[in-house]
Image (tube, coloured by chain):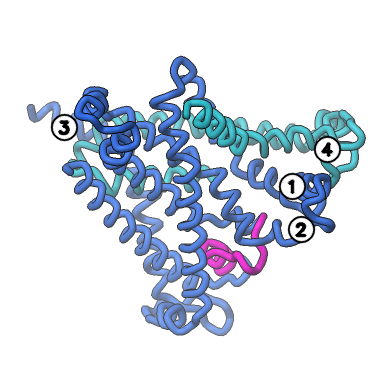
Amino acid sequence: MRGTRLSAWLVALPPFAWIAVFLFAPYCLLFAYSFWSLDAGQQVLRHATLENYLHLATTPLYLTVILRSMRIAFSVVLLSLLIGYPLACFLVFQAGKYRRILYQAVIIPLWISYLVRAYAWKVIFGNEGVLNTLLLWCHATRHPLGFLLYSPFAVIVTLTHIYVPFVVLPVVAALEKIPHELLESSSDLGATAWQTFIRVIVPLSLPGVLSGATFAFLLSFGDFLSPLLLGGPSSVMIANIVANLFGADYNWPLGAAVAVLILVMVLVILSITQRLERRWRVA
Amino acid sequence: MKALSRVYAAAVYAFLYLPILVLVVYSFNLDGVGGFPPHHWTLKWYRILFDDAAMWNAVGNSTIVALSTVVLSMLIGFSGGLRARSLLFPRQGCFSTAGAVAADRSRA
C-alpha cells in the first residue's frame, strides 16, 4: 500500500514540477510585478504599491476595453452555439453511417494554424476580397463595403469560425451520453419529436453546452491575434492592451496588473460554470 | 426535416472549410492581393517558395520545435494523465479546465 503511494507520487512528480515551475512560479512573479512600479528612468521599483490597480480603477479606457472584450466573447459564444448545437444534433441523431467521418471533419480545421485561418478571413473581408467581389457581382452593392474588415464584426466572425469546433465537440459528447431508452420512452408516452427535443434532449445536453460555451468565451475573451489582424481601433481587446503594455510601452508592472485582473475574472467565470455544471449534472 | 438538417450541416461545413479553400485558391493567383476569383492562374508563388532557403530553414525550425514538444508533452502529460490528477486534484473541476485552457492558449 505504502509502496504504491510512493510510486504514485513519483509518477506525479514531472507534471507537478512542470506546473510549479512553468505555471505557478510565473503567476507568482506576475502577481509580484503588479504591485511594483516604474521610476522615471523606466526601471522597475520593487516596492509594494497599489498604484497600478488605482490607475486601472480610475482610467475608463480599461473598463471600456474589458466590457468590449466581454461583448465580443459573448457574441462569439452565441454564434458558435447557434452554429454548433444543431450540427452536434445532426451528427449524433441523423448523420448515420457518415457520422465518424463528419465528426472528424469538425476536428480537422483545428489542426490548421490559427494564423492561417485568420488571414483567410482577411482575404475574404478585404476591399477587393471574396465577399465584396461577390456582392458587387450580384449587384447587391455598388461600391465595396469598407466596414467589413477592421471591425468588431470581422473579429467576431473569425473567432466564431475558430471556436465552433470547441462547442460542437462537448455538445456531441453530452448528446451521446443520453440513453436511447429515454428518447424511446418519451415518444412512447406521447411526446412529439419537438417535445422530446425541448424537454429531454436540451436539458440533458446542458453540461456539454456549458463547457463548450465556457471554452469559447474564455478563449475569445483573451484573444489578441484576431483583433490584431482583423480588428481596427474600434475592436481593441484586453489582451492587446496587455501585449502593448509588456511590449511597446514597456510598463511591465501595469501590464501585470491588467493580467492579474483578467486572471481573476477567468477564475470567477470558471468557478461559476463549474458550480452550474455540477448542479445540472445532478438535475 | 431530414433534408433541411442536411442543408444546415452542409452550410456549417462550408463555413468551416471555405475560408481555408479560399486561401488555397489565392496561392495560384498571379495578381497577389485582391481580385477573386483569380484572373490569371500561376504556379509562380510555389516556385518562389521552393527556391526560398530562409523559408525552408523556418520549416526546419518548426519541425524541430514540434517534435520536441511532442516528446516533452508525452513525458509530462503521460505521467500526469496516469496518476497526478486523481492524486493532486481529487475533486477535479476548476484545475483540469484551467489546464486545458492554458494548453490551448500556448498553442495560439
Q: On the rendered structure, is A167 left or right of A8?
A: right
State which region is magenta.
Answer: A230-246
Residue found at x 46% / y 43%: B104
How busy is the neighbourhood of tag 1: few (under 14 within 10 Å), some, or many (20 plus)? Answer: some
| Mark 3 or mark 1, earlier in chain | 3
Q: Which kind of residue does numbered mark 4 sit on?
A: Pro
In the depicted structure, whether residue A77 falls above or below residue A169: below
Whole-percent x, y for residue A276 in the image? 25, 51
Q: Chain of mark 2?
A: A
Element class at badge 2: loop
Q: On the rendered structure, is A274 left or right of A232?
A: left
Element class at badge 1: helix
Mark closer to the observer (3, 4): 4
Whole-percent x, y for residue A255 in the image? 49, 69
**Given the current orientation, which residue lies at the most extreme right position?**
B40
Q: Which residue is mark 1?
A: A131
Element class at badge 4: loop
**Which of the pair A169/A97 is nearer the observer?**
A97
Q: Which residue is mark 2?
A: A145
* Residue A20 belongs to the span the image colors magenta: no
Q: Which kind of residue does numbered mark 1 sit on?
A: Leu
**Given the current orientation, which residue lies at the most extreme top position?**
A97
Q: Are marks 2 and 4 on the same chain?
A: no
Q: Which kind of residue does numbered mark 2 sit on?
A: Leu
Mark 3 → mark 4, Cα distance in angstroms: 64 Å
Chain B, which colour?
Answer: cyan
Residue found at x 67% / y 31%: B60
How busy is the neighbourhood of tag 3: few (under 14 within 10 Å), some, or many (20 plus)? Answer: few
Where does the N terminus of chain A fall, quadrant-wise? top left
Say if mark 2 contacts mark 1, CB within 8 Å.
yes
Q: Which residue is mark 3?
A: A6
Q: Which residue is mark 4?
A: B37
